Amino acid sequence: MTNHIPWWQSGTIYQIYPRSFQDSNGDGVGDLPGIIQRLPYLQWLGVDALWLSPIYPSPMADFGYDVADYTNVDPLFGSLDDLDQLVRETHARGMRLILDLVPNHTSDEHPWFVQARATRENPYRDWYIWRDPAPDGGPPNNWLSHFGGPAWTLDPATGQYYLHLFDPKQPDLNWRNPEVRQAIYEVMRFWFARGVDGFRIDVIWMLIKHPELPDNPLDPDWTPAAKPQNRLQRIYDQHQPEVHEIIREMRCVADEFPERVLIGEIYLPIEQLVSYYGSKLDEVHLPYNFNLLKLKDWHASAVRDLVEHYERALPAGAWPNWVLGNHDQPRLATRVGQAAARLGQMLLLTLRGTPTIYYGDELGMENVPIPAEQIVDPQGIRAPGWGRDPERTPMQWDDSLGAGFTTGIPWLPLAADYARRNVALQREGNRSLLTLTRRLLELRRSHAALSVGRYSTCPTANQDVFAYLRSDGTTQLLVLLNFDSQPVSLDMSSHGAEGDILVSSLMDREGSLDLASLNLRPHEGLVVALR
Ligand code: GLC
């Protein structure tokens, strides 16, 4: 019997931030018809699944992560019919569609919260987390919002505080209430029944809090260089043991439908992260692995240590995944520079595990400086210097006035370099990052060794080179990544006398290679087929 490999293991995910991908009606904000127009591009690029950040009706206090109705589409993005059409057309092109599920909190304008705050006796009151003021009238404990400031806001009409781990307009749901659980599970069924292939689940590790809501201790390692809201250790407001039971329930809902995927947003160290696969692999299919994205030390040895650490920590049968960018973190090209970002793309697309590409990273899009008066991200407003607008700017399609993104005024400024860095130009360029990305995705499709094969580290004599083998029963591919800005020479003849270069990250050489005296240029990566 051959093993069936699910699409979310062999495939590549592409994250779309809908506000910034393609505007179809000139209002400066991207929308679903815009995404539909760009499906040919995504199919040409060769990705397998699209994950959309939230498209639900929302007051947009956190740009859709404040949901006012879980089973509809915000008119800004289009209609439910547009979503149905997007599902159909994505499927017709052989791709999958993943939505964002935001179960930790709703908008304060969600009817559940409107009810909950009406009176203390309202049946929805217990759907959220309410506490009396502390004796001095202040918040019930010292918890801090991830966006800065206290995690509690007083509701003057009913005289109690409600908890919000994010913006005051994002009250946290009470996951200890079974009605809340059932309500969210029904939301999942609603979208699965419409053909949606899975969910990326927002802040899944925060869903349930310690029952006593104790104060969090000060973090002894905190320095003023870090976010002010991180000065407490988040011991009691996240990663509680009971969260696993909830995730198992979510998994049961997903398993009512064939081949659906659950991906958990989890910022935790590796040992804790892997617990979200579930002790019987019965929780999320992919606990998002942000350890590469958060790696401070972008060097061959640090990356190698991380990859080995993660590979070792994975429970038997668990499928790995890798991420280099998302809508909450500075862009890869800004973190490491353009040359290293190109190598990073090769790393992402050749490691073992499902890769997620953040829109625009295939072009090397960079953080865009946002003038103070144009900051709109709630975190940027509440915690100055920590805004996320810079990594959310419009996709750079071409050199026209609105970058091919909009005919109107874009909701965030376009990058200054958009006329030089865009899809139209890079599609034509044989050596562009876009062409490299497409080539690597093509290699993943044509070589099971790359998409689903085994991984093993290859020792090298050079500290700056990270080398590994990807292999299935028939093919062995050697990946060599030079993290240094100097050329290096290597002897890899223990793997044979010669190999064939399938791709260089610089996109300018192919053909046979003498493994005994091999040269890599600064920041060059190679995928080599061994004979
Ligand atoms: C997640 C999202 C982020 C959002 C937050 C609150 O971290 O990725 O964008 O602000 O949750 O929903």
Image (cartoon, rainbow, N blue to C red):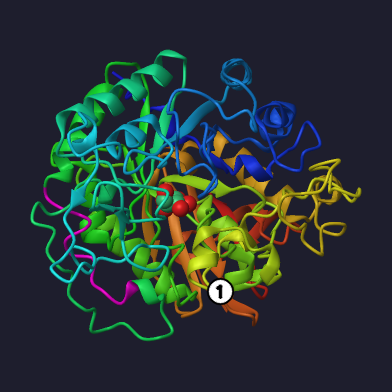
Task: Give the quarter of the image for residue 259.
Answer: top left
**Quick check: 230 above or below 325?**
below
Q: Which residues are magenta?
A: 230-241
Name the residue nearer the viewer: 237 or 198: 237
Q: Which part of the image, by quadrant, shows the N terminus? A: top left
Name the residue nearer the viewer: 434 or 382: 382
Task: Give the quarter of the image for residue 417.
Answer: bottom right
Q: Write the residue at 68% across / 31% down.
A: 35
Residue 293: percent from left, percent from top: 46, 62
Relative placement, left or right, of 159 versus 69 is left
Question: Mark 1: which secondary structure?
Answer: loop
Which class describes the residues within 10 Å of circle 1: few (<14), some (14-19), or many (20+)?
A: many
Is residue 238 shown in magenta? yes
Name the residue nearer the viewer: 337 or 500: 337
Residue 520: percent from left, percent from top: 63, 71
Q: Write the residue at 19% across / 47% down.
A: 208
- Residue 281 visible, this orientation: no
Residue furthest out toward the front: 157
